[in-house]
Amino acid sequence: MTHRPKAQQSWGAPQAMTKALTDLRRILGDSDVAMPSGDVMQSSLRHFASTQEARSFTELKYVCYGVTLPVGAAGWRIIDRPPLFEKLISLVEAREGQPRQFRRCYQGLLNGYFGYDRSPDAATAASTVNWGRLRGFLDHKLDPLMAKTRLREAAPGWIETLLSHRNLLTSDPCTRYAKALAGGDRAPFRQVCTELGIPATSWVWEDALMAYVQTVCGAADPAFHAGLPGILDLVNARSDLRLPRALATRAAALAVARYARCARKPVHEDLRDTCVERIGDPWLHRVAWDADVRSDPAREMVGAWINRALIRDFFKLLAQDGAADVRRLDYWLKWELEISGMWFVLGADARRNKSKPFLDLRKLMAERERALAGNDGQNNAFIMRIGPLMVIEFGLTNNACYVFAASDFKTDLGRQTFSIDDLKQRALAKRLSHTPGWEPRFDMELRTLLRTVPAERGELRPVIRRPTGR
């Protein structure tokens, strides 16, 4: 049994069909074309599917306009069914001797071409092939259509526009518009879409916007840096232009991979936050980064940005609140580039803090945040992964630093709540005390452990449970 794609389930509903027909009426360029009700359109499509015939020219025209519309509860489309699609094309070709009728059918097929749903939930192998054949048919018939129309009357504006933008009927339909979009000039592309009746939900918009993203990412460093804010506005829906989520993720991936190739690449907070939102934390979601971005330098760059922001901002906030030893926190800032992963185990005071800086930081922490249970609400634990080591430092004084080979640490970091005893596993750890002159001694101890602890002891047991849903 063929299951109906979820994305298409609403088309059988009267309201959805009414909206589709409203769009079609707006799209039609000839004033004498009457559009049917939803029921009539559905009836025409069903009759054609069962007989492979049209009872009249009007019905044939309706079928042309409905070539990519889902029908009824099953949601099938003519473009999904090769025999039906081929029959429809042959019936339209048979009308070439009647130029006005052929033009009406051509316009209907053109509308279907622009309205085709290419999303993975809707597109099938057959429909993808037929959509390509439809594009070839429209391109092949455009010149004869114009010639025959001009013999009888002035050509409608949409035909003139299509001739001027014939790129829309090629395998590279939208690169032409990318440069203007990248320069902030949207008017020419909008005008084309208006004159051809291309709705904002069409794949044409998606292709044009992605061509714009690729143009910016393909530019030299200065032009790329200048164009990056526009890409991020597009990805984050901060402009009147929109991308579907999957393409927004793709655009973010292209942008961050390009940024990583720049000669100058200072921390870019908007790019960092966009990547975390669209792709995920590069340490927690390595699989997503490998699949979407496919750039180790980009993943490592964003990971370093996140680590740096978490260490600096969180330590700064704790110091401002008087909940941390500033010397202790300043020391760990020197290790930020060597820290490959971290968790923040927050005491009650930090969890209750509703100031904007704390809320923003906790948002960046996301899946790295844990809760520290107990009566001392001011204390916080910082768990850091440095090479094969797990290092646990506490915010308050009178707490030693605990260093483990990662495989010796027995607490499941996938848990959301810890006690002090869960973290201070004295029998397994090396304890480093903050006695006078401790910083150089910490440097020496940590460098020695990094040289002597075998890499195979760097695997956490139990393994951290990775979050799902990305």
Image (tube, rainbow, N blue to C red):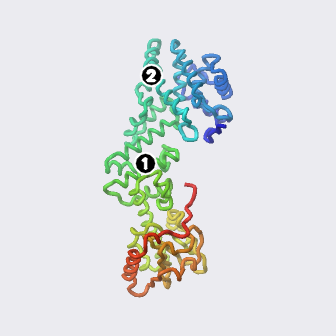
Name the residue: 50% across, 32% down. 198
Q: Position of residue 423 (x, y in %)?
A: 54, 77
Q: Can residue 322 be spotted in the picture?
A: no
Cα separation, mark 1 vs mark 2, equals 36 Å
Q: Quadrant of residue 46?
A: top right
Picture quadrant of residue 54: top right
- Residue at disc 2, secondary structure: helix
The amino acid sitting under disc 2 is His
Picture coordinates of residue 213 (x, y %)? 41, 45
Badge 1 or badge 2: first in the primary sequence = 2
| Residue pictured at 40% horizontal, 72% vertical | 333
Q: Which of marks 1 and 2 is in front?
A: 2
- In the rendered view of the protein, which quadrant contains the C terminus? bottom right
| Mark 1 burial class by Cα count in 10 Å: few <14, some 14-19, many 20+ | many
On screen, residue 192 above or below 300: above
Q: Position of residue 344 (x, y in %)?
A: 51, 70
Q: Which residue is drawn at 58% across and 31% down?
A: 80
Find residue 251 and name its label: none
Q: Is residue 134 above or below residue 436?
A: above
Q: Position of residue 51 (x, y in %)?
A: 66, 21
Q: How many marks on residues? A: 2
Is residue 20 something one can see in this rendering? Answer: yes
User: Pointer 1: what residue?
Assistant: 231
Q: Kindly identify the amino acid type of the residue bearing the numbered disc 1.
A: Ile
Nearest the eye: 204 or 155: 204
CB under 8 Å between callouts 1 and 2? no
Quadrant where the N terminus sits is top right
- Graded by Cα atoms within 10 Å as few (under 14), some (14 to 19) or many (20 or more), the crowding at tag 2 reads few
Q: Name the residue under label 2.
A: 140
Q: In this view, does 133 lie above or below 100?
A: below
Secondary element at tag 1: helix
